[in-house]
Amino acid sequence: MKVLVAVKRVIDYNVKVRVKADNSDVDLANVKMAMNPFCEIAVEEAVRLKEKGVATEIVVVSIGPKVAQEQIRTSLALGADRGILVETEEKLESLSVAKILKAIVDKEQPQLVILGKQSIDNDNNQTGQMLGALTGLPQGTFASEVTVEGDKVNVTREIDSGLRTVGLTMPAIVTSDLRLNEPRYASLPNIMKAKRKPLEVVAPADLGVEVKSTQTLVKVTPPAERSAGIKVASVDELVDKLKNEAKVL
Amino acid sequence: MSILVIAEHDNSAINGATLNTISAAKAIGGDIDLLVAGESCGAAAEAAAKIEGVAKVLVADDATYKYQLAEPMGDLVAELGKGYTHILAPATTTGKDFLPRAAALLDVNMVSEIIKVESADTFLRPIYAGNAIATVQSSDAIKVITVRATGFDAVASEGGSASVESVAAVADKGVSAFVGEELAKSDRPELTAASIVISGGRGMQNGDNFEMLYKVADKLGAAVGASRAAVDAGFVPNDMQVGQTGKIVAPDLYVAVGISGAIQHLAGMKDSKVIVAINKDEEAPIFQVADYGLVADLFEAIPELESKL
């Protein structure tokens, strides 16, 4: 069975973002970039499925600028077999991303598509679901466990009230949550090997997808700052402050 | 303008986040219809009709919608939503699951987790784990939006008198099915609705020690939450997680116990009115956002706090 994994190049999760002085966007100049953490989990899950003998081939796709090849190479070093970069300098909105991924799904015919549940830049949490709608495939979002049995996949999802398991007929779409697995680090020999794995570069137009934007980023501002309050010396003082100053008890 | 709000419910009662979502719809302005899709959901529909500001309740009562699975819900919302200018759902794990499907079927983009309405086409939403706030303007013919409950005051659940209308189910493709559920059972208030939340982090050391927090919570009528570190370590289940990818809370009082304060955690609680941090590490970043900080060993401070409440 073939597994398709989508990965995104985003700001490294350890970097604290700053808003540009002119409030046009956040400042990403000279900022460390990396694979979106949820996408790393998606790649790891695909690799584990291959190690279990469930998956036979892992194709990893990224949509972004030329440098996004780095994140595809990282995925190849972790165990993916080949990569596809849909190269564009434009900042695409989720619907366009989903349309491009649908074109890749039509071409590659994977049994399972795994994506991160959201990217840590725009925090949209939309692409996997939109891809599900466009392809007509079922989805298991916010996955914490994935079990393939025959032509079915059971996905345990993290929901507000606990855990819920859905059974999907494959082909199907899964979006990963944090506890699906703990991604491995790529070993040096695997990083070297990844350099020789195939990586195809295409443009959205090659896939017959016309990207269009319907959202304008009017401005970006820093959130309201919370200033540090005071230190109290004892539990007694804390209870007193909460009762008499903050009046929340 | 005409707005379709999708109610979250358990077939008998309406989930509170629906009331905040209707509040966002009122800020947009226009007629508000509320969709209740479920199975044997008459009681929920009845409750929905009483909510302030709702003109009409649409009820899709069919076995297909018993668990509000994303595939049939997406199809239904896309079908019903065609005649509206806005479609809103709460930014819960249910709303986030089906609404992007509906948007894609309508060939429009979606605006996730808005915290403020600037005008009928312009909305504020947090990005980068809440480290920046984006103002986004949408030119889509139908604006499809999820609403973060903490950004909007709830409308009254009583006082309205909406008409109730049945709508037909959309044929399900039968490619997804409910298998099972493990739901948290607790007599304490729900995290996102509680006026006081007390959360534990890695400093709690194990799940048994959360008992100390439960005792304090029960004296205060508080809900108990946790940091991602505490959930990852297996101390407590995932539904207790507060943070960027867990629950977003904004209670009157938030007490962080043994939580260092990673930005992903702060993203889930920094809009709380009063924040208390109890941590033995005085350098912990949580103190930078706390109104009251107590540098102390939580294993001494928490039992003492309990005894003094």
Image (cartoon, coloured by chain):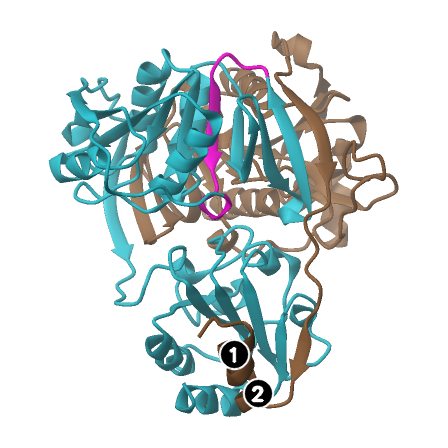
Q: State left or right for residue A177 relative to residue B171.
A: right
Among the chains pictured, the one given cyan colouring is B
Q: Are marks 1 and 2 in contact (CB under 8 Å)?
A: no
Q: State left or right for residue B6 relative to residue B142.
A: left
Q: Secondary structure at mark 2?
A: helix
Q: Quarter-wise, where is residue A75 in the image?
A: top right
Give how far across and how far down residue B28 sits, in percent.
48, 26
Vertical arrangement, residue B9 with respect to residue B83, above or below: below
Task: Chain letter for mark 2, please.
Answer: A
Q: Earlier in the sequence, mark 1 or mark 2?
A: 2
Q: Secondary structure at mark 1?
A: helix
**A85, B209: nearer the viewer:** B209
- The reply to whether label 1 and label 2 mark residues of one chain is yes
- The residue that mark 2 highlights is A237
Type of residue at label 1? Asn
Q: Is residue B144 magenta?
A: yes
Q: Quarter-wise, where is residue B135 in the image?
A: top right
Which range is magenta? B139-151
Give how far across and how far down residue A164 sits, in percent.
31, 48
Type of residue at label 2? Glu
Vertical arrangement, residue A126 with respect to residue B260, above or below: above
Give how far across and how far down residue B170 sits, in percent.
23, 18
